[in-house]
Image (cartoon, helix red, strand yellow):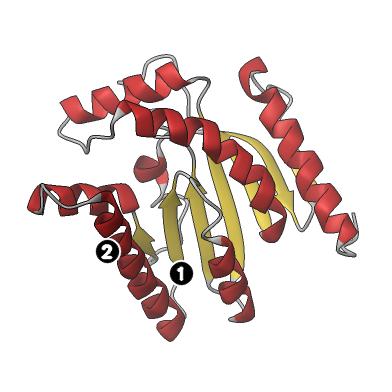
Amino acid sequence: MPIFTVVAGPNGAGKSTFSAMFSRPGALIFDPDVQKYKIEKQYPDISDDAIGSVLTKEYINFQGKALGKMLHLTVETNLQSDYLLSSVEIFKQASYDTRLIYMLLPDIATSIDRVALRVKQKGHFVDIESVKTNFEVGPKNLLKIADQFDRVMLISGFNNNPQVETQPQLLINIENGMTRYKSDEIPDWCKGIVNSTEVAATYNQASKGHKI
């Protein structure tokens, strides 16, 4: 069964670093931050609206290619909106397994520092206001859409030394509204969002008639 995977989280959480690891071999991977950086570099005066339009068209092309050939597709996102909700339903109708992986960071300062380090390493830049917005809005949209996916995983993308790559820590795994795994060592800074996601996913699935 092909898989539609959404790898979400704030800037600097490790989405681009680990999206390939979270994907099946041969999966198409759509990274909007990288696409946006390329567009801005080529067209410095392009408006935000125009960039958004180009990114949407690019994503639709990726989606069409995946569906046309029944390929795995992974999409990286900050979850600034619930735009991908329509895609989840489209892929479900096409007999895809749908997965949401949300990578967490402890605070906005960590997200900003990660982006600054990435820029020093020749990675793409994201302005501070966008970083703040993504950090604050992402978890809210996570709670809105988590129950729409067949599988939801929350992962810690934090380590004490960001210059040393470590494996992300799985915090919770929810499948079809049932908690299959929950870590006994969830850091204090993310207990709230982990518990809220668990409640939202299981409650909403139950209200749809799924067995809990």
Q: Position of residue 202 (x, y in %)?
A: 82, 49
Q: Position of residue 16 (x, y in %)?
A: 35, 44
Q: Is residue 42 left or right of residue 194?
A: left
Asked whether 166 or 5 is in front, the reply is: 5
Q: Position of residue 23 (x, y in %)?
A: 45, 57
Asked which secondary structure carries label 2, the reply is helix
Determine whether 212 is above or below 121 in the image.
below
- What residue did someone put label 1 on? 72
- Please indicate, yes or no, whether residue 149 appears anywhere in the rendered image: yes
Residue for point 36% across, 71% down: 62
Q: Is residue 185 left or right of residue 21?
A: right
Residue for point 67% across, 55% down: 151
Badge 2, how many Cα within 10 Å: few under 14, some, many 20+? Answer: some
Q: Which numbered disc flags the more N-terminal residue, 1 or 2?
A: 2
Dots 1, 2 in contact, CB < 8 A: no
Q: Position of residue 55 (x, y in %)?
A: 31, 60
Residue at the far bottom: name it: 68
Q: Quadrant of the N terminus?
A: bottom right
Disc number lying in front (1 or 2): 2
Q: Amino acid at mark 2?
A: Val
- What separation in Å lies between label 1 and label 2 (alpha carbons)? 22 Å
Asked whether 197 or 17 is in front, the reply is: 197
Q: Quadrant of the C terminus?
A: bottom right
Determine whether 31 is above or below 86 in the image.
above
- Please indicate, yes or no, whether residue 164 appears anywhere in the rendered image: no
Label placed on residue 54? 2
Residue for point 25% across, 29% down: 118
Asked whether 25 or 74 is in front, the reply is: 74
Q: Amino acid at mark 1?
A: His
Badge 1, how many Cα within 10 Å: few under 14, some, many 20+? Answer: many
